[in-house]
Image: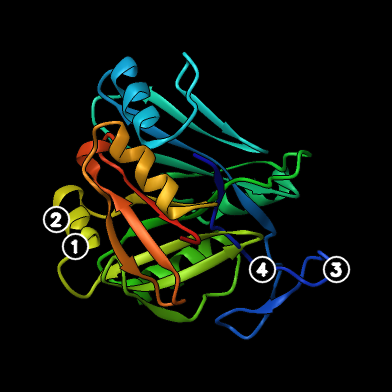
Amino acid sequence: MILTGIDVSYHWSERGLKLPFQGATGLEVRATILTRIDHVAIGVADLASGIAAYMRIGFEVDSNGVARNDGDHLQLAPAPREGLRSIALASDDLAADSAAVRARHGIAYLTLTAQNVQPATRHPERVYIAVKDVAASAAFYARVLGVPAPKMERGTVINADMAIFQFGPTALGLAQPNAPGVCADALARRGPGPFQILYRTSSMDACAKWIADHGLPPPARGIRNTGEQAMLVMPEHACGVVIGFVGPA
């Protein structure tokens, strides 16, 4: 199965320059440039079992629990509680951006890392974080990360109102459930925090066949607000994480 990308993006100029934006006080604020999601870490109860689970979904995972794409990776690691534990965002100016985020008291499960010189042609498309109040959370994340707050949109697959922070070809989505579904389930089960990773695949049907051929139930399918098809592997088959796929049939 071919995974072609995660969806994450931020505040870009057409020339890749840092752009100032107007803060809540009306003063210009230096815009942090976070270029993409660099990697994610997933807690697993047992490393061997976690590796087997992600290989059944279609990831190529080495004996250390690392599934590498071009320029980024997914890391499985034993932990007291399964689930999506941390998200590393790549910065074009790590020292300055890290100091700025620390000064704003940071966000527990977000870290910054130096920009990888290797271009990412396959990466996660989005990582979603469940929140209780998406408008308030979007304002908080914008302040901590030093970026403008995004517009709100409706997520039709996870049944949530969302604020999508775009970082290059990838995105960080804050999601407040508006109906029963995986976002509401994640918030009830684990409380606020990261719960889903969305990958782009070159063939949804081939992806679904791989998953079925490896003994998992057919992923739930839906239509995104972009009109694209998406499907979800549920947390019980992915070590506490919802793994989503989007792409052509």
* Element assignment for label 3: loop
Q: CA distance from mark 2 to mark 4?
A: 32 Å
For marks 3 and 1 on the same chain, the one whose residue lies earlier in the sequence: 3
- Specify the amino acid type for callout 2: Ala
Q: Nearer the viewer, mark 4 or mark 1?
A: 1
What whole-number distance in Å separates the C-alpha atoms at marks 2 and 1?
Answer: 6 Å
Residue type at mark 3? Arg
The image quarter in which residue 212 lies: top left
In the image shown, does 23 or 228 lie closer to the viewer? 228
Residue 101 to residue 173: above or below: above
Amino acid at pointer 1 = Ala
Q: Which residue is label 3 attached to? A: 15
Q: Dot 2: few (<14), some (14–19), or many (≥20) neighbours within 10 Å?
A: few
> In the image, residue 232 lies at what x, y percent?
31, 53
Residue under label 1: 184
Q: Indicate the position of residue 215 as horizontal and vertical percent values.
A: 24, 32
Which of the two labelled residues, at mark 4 and mark 1, occupies the earlier sequence position? Answer: 4
SS state under label 1: helix
Circle 4 SS class: loop
Q: Give the labeled residue for mark 4.
A: 11
Up the image or down, 232 lies above or below 30; here it is above
Q: Vertically, is 12 above or below 92?
A: below
State the separation of the CA atoms marked 3 and 1: 39 Å
Q: Mark 4 packing: few (<14 Cα in 10 Å), some, or many (20+)?
A: many
Q: Between disc 2 and disc 4, whose residue precedes?
A: 4
Q: Percent from the top left, x then y, of residue 30?
A: 71, 67
Q: Which residue is mark 2?
A: 188
Q: Badges 3 and 2: C-beta atoms under 8 Å apart?
A: no
